[in-house]
Amino acid sequence: MLAFTSCASKAPGEASTMVASQKGVPGGTVVQTYKVTATVTAVDAATRRVTLSTADGNKTIFKAGPEVANFEQIQVGDQVKATLVEQVIVFVRKDGEPASDGESAAVALAPLGDKPGMLLANTVEVTAKVEAIDLDHRKATLRFPDGHAQIFSVRKDVDMTKGKIGDDVVIRTTEAMAITVEKP
């Protein structure tokens, strides 16, 4: 059984959080999504600066680097839509399962001739060791590869007596951002 919960708010952008976990299984998944739309209110082609305004009146100036293809197509009145997503997955690695700690990234740009747009994604995986288990307070202390330790709360439905000192806990974080420029 997977449990899902969600909440959302609508202030100048949209934010939502989704949590999924399997009853009795340590760890789970949390996905946070944030969306915002802004309007291009000024374009300075010489300096490659674009002024964006959100619906609540906030203005921000961005400098587009040379990697932003099709910059010349951005016009006042265009809508810039950005979606940011962060996913965190936590699980206990099974005995004998190989570690895959590390980092990977991907970038995709809009084809030449299209409105500017891009997708960036980055995934980092790190394995921490269970250093202490506090059954009375439902806490576990994890030691990370850089030497720091952190205490985490454990859900009430997880049988902590099945965990042991030295277990590997994997934390995989993926951050992604998509930006598109569209006609209103």
Image (spheres, rainbow, N blue to C red):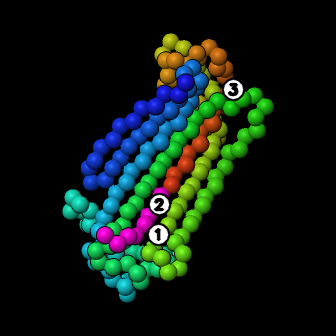
State which mark lies toward you, 3 or 1: 1
Please name whichever residue, 142 or 161, is drawn nearer the observer in this view of the structure. 161
Image point 66% across, 22% down: which residue? Answer: 165
Q: Is residue 22 left or right of residue 181?
A: right
Where is residue 174 shown, x and y percent of the image?
A: 55, 49
Image point 27% across, 54% down: which residue? Answer: 12
Circle 3: is it few (<14), some (14-19), or many (20+) Cα within 10 Å? few
Where is residue 153 shown, x and y percent of the image?
A: 49, 25
Location of mark 3 (residue): 166
Give the mark nearest the N terminus, 2 or 3. Answer: 3
- Quick one: SS at disc 2? strand
Q: Is residue 82 left or right of residue 21?
A: left
Determine the CA span between mark 1 and mark 2.
Answer: 7 Å
Image height check: is 161 above or below 68?
A: above
Question: For residue 141, what is the image quadrant?
Answer: top right
The magenta region covers 177-184
Where is residue 57 shown, x and y percent of the image?
A: 21, 62
- Quick one: SS at disc 1? strand
Circle 1: is it few (<14), some (14-19), or many (20+) Cα within 10 Å? many
Numbered badge on residue 117: 1
Give the mark nearest the N terminus, 1 or 2. Answer: 1
Please name whichever residue, 48 or 78, is drawn nearer the observer in this view of the structure. 78
Image point 51% across, 62% down: which residue? Answer: 119
Give the mark nearest the N terminus, 3 or 1. Answer: 1
Q: Which residue extends farthest bottom?
A: 46
Dominant secondary structure (helix, strand or loop) of the stretch shown in magenta: strand
Residue contact at pointers 1 and 2, CB within 8 angstroms? yes
Image point 44% across, 38% down: which residue? Answer: 18
